[in-house]
Image: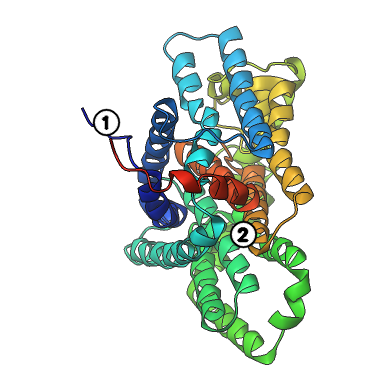
Amino acid sequence: MVRFWRIPNSTIDRINPWFAAFVIGSPPVLGSVTSVLIIGTMLLCAARIASGELKFAREPNVKAIALVFALWFCVQALSGVIHYQPHTTLLEIFRNTPFLGLLFLFSGFAVSNPARLALPTESGIIVGAFAALIYALYQYLNGMVRVEGLTGNPGPFAAMSLLLYGYCVILVARNRGKIQLIALLAAAAATICVILSGMRGAWLGLILLPIAVFAIYRADLRRLINLKTAFALGTVLILAASVTYPVIAERFEILFLEWQMVGKSNLLGTSVGDRIAAWSAGWALMTKAPLLGYGLDQGPALMGRWTFDAYGVSHGLSHFHNIVIDTGVRTGLLGIIMLLAMVATPLILAVKTPKNEFGKFGYAALTILMLTYLIVGATGRMLGHDIMDTVFIFAASYWCVFIFGTEIADSQKSKLNQTMM
């Protein structure tokens, strides 16, 4: 009997670059389809490792990162078990199981050398940005006030588009000539997507992400700053502004009006008011159960009771619109510690590792990943959504291949010519 996971590493090595490129570029357009692909890949890698077809990666830095991700799952599960609720807790724990799979994904992609992965990855990023723009303009021109692609929500669409924007800025920094110009246009496409989502909290990333990228590529700034690049950048900014100005003006007008309403009437029912109420409720709840929180599924009910006591109206949102507060309510201080560890550990280990040009690419992309999620999570949902979770895990593992994976790929050359038995 031929088992589907018995695929030669040589075949996997040929598939990896273009499959990864597709997954990296597809989230804004395909939404949860990308999540299914990531989870399926995780399971396939696990099956190949179990059957002996794939070598389980033993790179110490990646093992440390995978351990932190696994501990995040354990803290979630512990809080869920302590605050167990029938019919809901087990489902919430199950939704977090992909955090156990980072090392499986890394093992699968570490078969390929980063030098083989880089060009397809760049292509996937650029194509993904333009595809997202086409879909966003289609939805916007057909009357959708806040575009969402196939993610089902403007929040994840904004986050995934912002992520592609940051990746495109990296391509601008590390390339020259036509590729640099195309990457600049792709960054403009992703910018338009972020703005058309209407998620004002994500707009800050349009400023912060380039600062982070050029801090990493600061040695190349002299090459990047020239008349041709300045002209191209100015043209792209004018193009993006002309398309998005009505949305920007409208969203800031709404923000100004909602801010004026704060303190003059009931907070609830506006974007600003709902967030202030959610943050206030979350902070009050955190101080009463600081260690392990209230469990994985009690947030909306607890927020509803708090807002009823405070405003006379029960208003329970699905989350607290801030990743630290949301994590604190769900899993307490232990959860917050593991959240910070998931963000900091990969970056610290990446900084300490000597890097060639591909390692630098991976380090910049990993920085963009973490910074994007923190920016989005400051006023929205960073984790706890299938797209946000799976893309976070996949991207973290994939960029680790660029930073830590070269030696692993070289050590597996002897297995690249295996054939199915």
- Disc 2: which residue: 203
Q: Secondary structure at mark 2?
A: helix
- Residue 277 in view, yes or no: no
User: How packed is label 2: few (under 14 Cα within 10 Å), some, or many (20 or more)?
Assistant: many
Q: How is the image coloured?
A: rainbow
Q: Amino acid at mark 2?
A: Trp
Question: Quarter holding the N terminus?
Answer: top left
**In percent of the image, x 37 and y 43: which residue is there?**
418
Question: What whole-number distance in Å separates the C-alpha atoms at marks 1 and 2?
Answer: 47 Å
Left or right of 119, for residue 379: right
Q: Nearer the viewer, residue 257 or 386?
A: 386
Would you place residue 239 above or below residue 295 in this image? below
- Residue 17 in view, yes or no: yes
Left or right of 193, for residue 344: right
Across and down, in percent, residue 323 comes to 65, 36
- Would you identify the image quadrant in which residue 200 lies? bottom right
Q: Amino acid at mark 1?
A: Arg
Would you place residue 296 above or below residue 124 in this image? above
Across and down, in percent, residue 357 comes to 66, 64
Left or right of 188, for residue 278: right
Q: Secondary structure at mark 1?
A: loop
Question: Quarter holding the C terminus?
Answer: top left
Would you place residue 88 above or below residue 310 in this image? above
- Disc 1: which residue: 3
Across and down, in percent, residue 211 comes to 73, 65
In the rendered picture of this protein, how many numbered marks are placed on residues? 2
Would you place residue 132 above or below residue 395 in this image? below
| Disc number placed over residue 196 in the picture, else none | none
Name which of mark 1 and mark 2 comes first in the sequence.
Answer: 1
